[in-house]
Amino acid sequence: MSETFRVYIDAGEFSCLSRIDTDVLRKQLLAVNGIGPETADDILLYAFERPVFVIDAYTRRIFSRLKLLAGDADYETLRHQFETGLQMETAVFNEYHALIVRHAKDACKNVPIVSTAVWHIPAHRVKGDQFLGFFFPFVL
């Protein structure tokens, strides 16, 4: 039996786990071998419907290309920036992350397809809060 499955059973399965405070549950998930911050946050957001923003390669790629974040910023810093910049609701985080994934898969690939990029913004325009604030509710 895998460690993850054993932890799940030992904790009382979904019904018991769903009653645990988000921060405590996140720490418990991170303590499981093989579960890192992104996986823990995926579980919290999608399985437990908790307002936790998932930072993944797609998020880093899109927002670093827009010059809205440093590509080497650590996970927790980025997560905090998104969580404080967006409305703290599970549905908002879920939809925002889904849109990021969709855009990254469709247009913002490892090699960008600029002609189809929904968020294609000329580099000289990616400055100043008034322009960025129009597209994003926060500036990272």
Image (cartoon, rainbow, N blue to C red):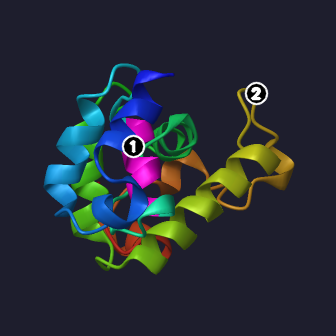
Vertical placement of 18 versus 134: above or below?
above
N-terminal label among 2 and 1: 1
Mark 1: few, some, or many residues within 10 Å (few <14, many ≥20)?
few
User: Residue 77 location in percent, x, y?
Assistant: 20, 42
The front one of 125 and 105 is 105
Q: Looking at the image, which residue is at 22% across and 51% down?
A: 25
Q: Quadrant of the C terminus?
A: bottom left
Say which residue label 2 marks.
111
Disc 2 vs disc 1: Cβ atoms closer than 8 Å? Answer: no
- Crowd band around label 2 with a 10 angstrom C-alpha radius: few (<14), some (14–19), many (20+): few
Report the side of 94 relative to 22 (left or right): right
**Residues in magenta, as a range:** 38-45
Instruction: Judge whether 65 appears above or below 34 on screen.
Output: below
Q: Which residue is mark 1?
A: 9
Q: Please, what is the dominant secondary structure of the magenta stretch?
A: helix
Amino acid residing under circle 1 = Ile
